[in-house]
Image (cartoon, helix red, strand yellow):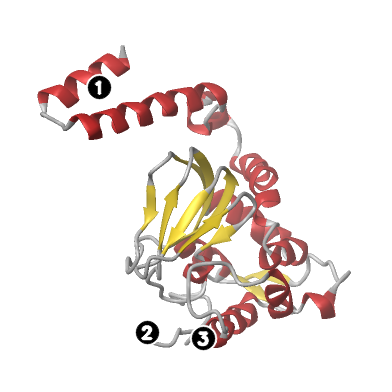
Amino acid sequence: QQLSILRRFLSDHSVSSRLAVRVQRNARHALQEMQRNMQEENVELLRLVSEPLRMELHFEIYSPILAKHPFFSQYIDECPHVMRKVCHKCTAIIPAFAGDVIFNPGETPNPPKMYFVMIGLLEYFTIGGHQLLVKESQWIAEATLWTVWSHRGGLRAKCDSQLCEVNAREFQKISGEFDHTLWDPRSYATNFVNLLNTYEGGITDLPLPKQVLEEACGIKNRRGSRSSTNCTKVEPNPLNAISEGAETDSD
């Protein structure tokens, strides 16, 4: 019935046949996805669960996805209570159907977001015509977390996919609510932006090599130093960016 109503809407508004087919296909896949994977907003009982328990739930769902990245893996180890709030407030799972454009070259995202590929395959494309695949377990647009950012390329789904997005502004806000006494994400932010400006591959949205990010985290010098006492709660930090003065060089 919903698909019938959609077809009538498209017909009444004289939508071209090509676009109408894409819209209907997208809607059909969305319905199938809803049937395969229960969405949190459709589980009414979860609204009755206490927020601390929902925070634990989101931490269990999202932390394994984020932990594929060296920074988040370290942050989970060092400050799990901060990351519980990050997973609760900043993350979401979104579908991306074949042909969907997630962002375009030159776009300044509002709000800025980092993405992890959970399922499927996406294509990163530049104005110059270069194309690179972004596969499962990879991430893209990390720079949105650490500096004011305009996308250097675009991202398009090659097939029906599923992404985990991290809202950069919410992440900065939550990180700024804690005092990091021994392991401070601001140090990583500064290292990342410096790497971005000096990396031989140039400035893009694509991920830097994992080994380079591990070095930026100081992981090699701190392995085995797991402690949840490295971060303490203080008043919210008014910084708009987690790394003061962290800026990329102009194009």
Where does the image place residue 37, in percent across and percent down from the top left? 56, 28
Circle number at residue 251: 2
User: To which residue does mark 3 refer?
Assistant: 197
The first of marks 1 and 3 along the sequence is: 1
Tell me which residue sits at (56%, 24%) in the image. 36
Q: What secondary structure is marked by label 3?
A: helix
Is disc 3 surrounded by few (<14), some (14 to 19) or many (20+) residues within 10 Å? some
Could you tell whether 45 is left or right of 112 in the image? Answer: right
Q: What secondary structure is marked by label 2?
A: loop
Please say if the residues under marks 2 and 3 sit with CB atoms less than 8 Å apart: no
Could you tell whether 58 is left or right of 34 in the image? Answer: right
Q: CA distance from mark 2 to mark 3?
A: 10 Å
Name the image quarter holding residue 152: bottom left
Q: CA distance from mark 1 to mark 3?
A: 48 Å
Where does the image place residue 186, in percent across and percent down from the top left? 60, 79
Which of 85 and 124 lies nearest the eye of the viewer?
Answer: 124
Q: Is the residue 198 above or below the residue 218 in the image?
A: below
Q: CA distance from mark 2 to mark 1?
A: 44 Å
Give, as a three-letter code, the residue at label 2. Answer: Asp
Q: Is the residue 218 above or below the residue 140 in the image?
A: below
Name the image quarter holding residue 57: top right
Tell me which residue sits at (70%, 44%) in the image. 60
Is disc 1 surrounded by few (<14), some (14 to 19) or many (20+) residues within 10 Å? some
Where does the image place residue 96, in percent across and percent down from the top left? 45, 42
Circle number at residue 6: 1
